[in-house]
Amino acid sequence: MTYDLPSARLRVALRGRYRGQRQGWFAQRFTKWDSNIRLDLHPHSEFDARRWAELDGMPALVVYFNRSIYEALVRAFAER
């Protein structure tokens, strides 16, 4: 799945080197405990927080220019 950055973000996001992004997605079942999820193990982690959410609520949680990707993910994963 791909998305293009809005023109106002082209020089700011991704250090101005990219116009968008191509993403690959997969789903898996998490069978451990929340304490096994560690976002602090890498000094330059992309994420500083996480939470569990319902699949169909995901599009509302992301920036507007990624929303169509998350809507497509909801449809694709709901079929399985």
Image (cartoon, rainbow, N blue to C red):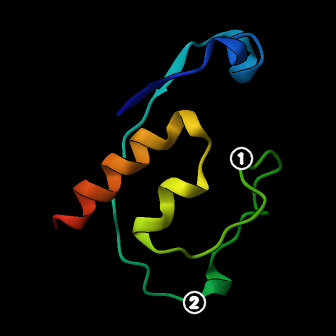
Residue farthest along the left direction in this orientation: 79
Q: In the image, is 47 to the left or to the right of 30? A: right
Q: Rounded to the nearest whole Å, what is the CA distance between mark 1 and mark 2? A: 21 Å
**Front in this rendered view, residue 42 or 49:** 49
Q: Would you place residue 11 above or below residue 28 in this image?
A: above
User: Which disc, if any, is residue 78?
Assistant: none
Q: Amino acid at mark 1?
A: Glu
Q: Total of numbered circles in the picture?
A: 2
Task: Provide the secondary structure element on which disc 1 rests.
Answer: loop
The quadrant of the rendering that contains the N terminus is: top left
Residue pictured at 75% horizontal, 17% vertical: 15
Residue pictured at 71% horizontal, 47% vertical: 46
Residue 48, percent across and down? 78, 59
**Front in this rendered view, residue 65 or 14:** 65
Are there few (<14), some (14-19), or many (20+) residues within 10 Å of tag 1? few
Displayed quadrant of residue 30: bottom left
Question: What residue is disc 2 on?
Answer: 33
User: Which disc, if any, is residue 46?
Assistant: 1
Q: Amino acid at mark 2?
A: Trp
Q: Would you place residue 37 above or below residue 69 in this image?
A: below
Residue 24, percent across and down? 37, 40
